[in-house]
């Protein structure tokens, strides 16, 4: 069977993925394995692995277009161009999915999520299965397609951001307290609240040695590979104080909070692409 999928096959895979994504965004249950089995029957010849790969490609395109993705389908970056064409066309009329995405990214966080052991939520940073192509300028893509960038809207959700920072504040206090560094634990400061959001980091904490730990918190309700947005100040501070700087990425925050950390300059730990320019007339 040809490696390139036909239009009909791509349409079927995208429709199946969109159905699962809509249910997930609305908090409705679905059986991923059963979806895969039914799609395999419909396609009649595509293997389960091939379908899994296509769904992972769909995750990548959705991210590039400013949409959340299904965390069960880790993004893979080398996709068939027809896939992007089909997804863009379907998104233009996917009113139900747009509504679900809108609600998901803008809903306020009423209470900080509870976990049985806050220090147990730490996981390693995600590892990509393949090397991404040069990152697309997402803002340009959104303007071309006249759609909203739901990932950017979520990043501006003030209650989500504050809840994430408060969660990390608790995490840091507990980390130092358990290490027997109670005086340091009591000095942990939510500087984004006490001093303002101009410092380039949100929380001033400490290593067990007493050295400062500068923590920038980025929170999402979606998967670990969801892009986040960094300010010029955050990037600059991460470079100037790379030995002390840590990016705390909270993901799946609303349902099952987990955390990974990136140490040092953001330019060394992340793919950075400018999405905002300051301009004045010539």
Image: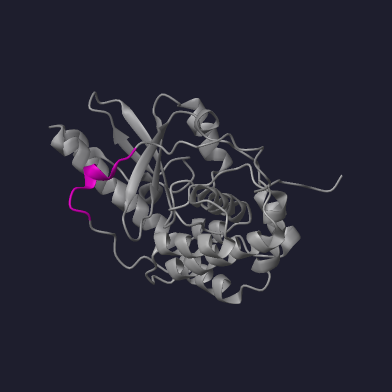
Which of the 4 quarters of the picture holds residue 273? top right
- Looking at this view, name the residue that lies furthest to the right: 282
- Taking depth in this image into account, of 100 and 6 the one nearest to the observer is 6
Q: Report the quarter where the C terminus lies.
A: top right
In the picture, measured across the screen, residue 44 lies left or right of residue 173, that is: right
Residue 119 image position (x, y, % from top left): 23, 42
Q: Which residues are magenta?
A: 115-123
Which of the 4 quarters of the picture holds residue 205? top left
Relative vertical location of residue 102 with respect to residue 185 in this rendering, above or below:
below
Q: Which residue is pictured at 19% across the width and 42% down the height? A: 174
Residue 76 image position (x, y, % from top left): 56, 44
Query: Residue 122 in magenta?
Result: yes
- Taking depth in this image into account, of 113 and 195 the one nearest to the observer is 113
Residue 176 image position (x, y, % from top left): 20, 36
Residue 46 image position (x, y, % from top left): 57, 53
Q: Which residue is pictured at 50% across the width and 26% down the height? A: 240
Q: Which residue is pictured at 29% across the width and 47% down the height? A: 169
């Amino acid at each position: 069977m040809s490696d390139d999928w036909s239009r009909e096959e791509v349409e079927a895979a995208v429709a199946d993925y969109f159905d699962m994504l809509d249910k997930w965004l609305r908090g409705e249950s679905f059986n991923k394995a059963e979806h895969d089995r039914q799609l395999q029957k419909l396609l009649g010849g595509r293997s389960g692995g091939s379908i899994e790969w296509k769904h992972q490609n769909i995750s990548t395109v959705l991210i590039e277009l400013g949409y959340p993705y299904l965390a069960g389908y880790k993004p893979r970056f080398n996709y068939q161009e027809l896939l992007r064409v089909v997804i863009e066309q379907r998104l233009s009329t996917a009113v139900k999915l747009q509504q679900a995405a809108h609600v998901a990214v803008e809903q306020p966080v009423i209470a900080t999520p509870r976990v049985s052991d806050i220090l147990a939520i730490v996981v390693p940073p995600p590892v990509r299965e393949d090397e991404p192509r040069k990152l697309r300028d997402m803002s340009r893509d959104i303007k071309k397609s006249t759609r909203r960038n739901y990932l950017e809207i979520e990043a501006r959700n003030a209650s989500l951001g504050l809840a994430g920072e408060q969660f990390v504040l608790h995490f840091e206090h507990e980390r130092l307290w358990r290490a027997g560094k109670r005086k340091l634990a009591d000095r942990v400061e939510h500087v984004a609240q006490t001093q303002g959001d101009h410092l380039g980091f949100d929380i001033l904490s400490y290593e067990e040695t007493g050295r400062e730990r500068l923590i920038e918190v980025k929170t999402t309700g979606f998967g670990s590979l969801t892009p986040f947005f960094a300010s010029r100040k955050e990037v600059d501070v991460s470079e100037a104080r790379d030995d002390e700087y840590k990016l705390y990425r909270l993901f799946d925050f609303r349902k099952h909070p987990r955390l990974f950390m990136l140490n040092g300059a953001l330019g060394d730990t992340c793919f950075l692409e400018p999405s905002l320019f300051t301009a004045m007339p010539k």
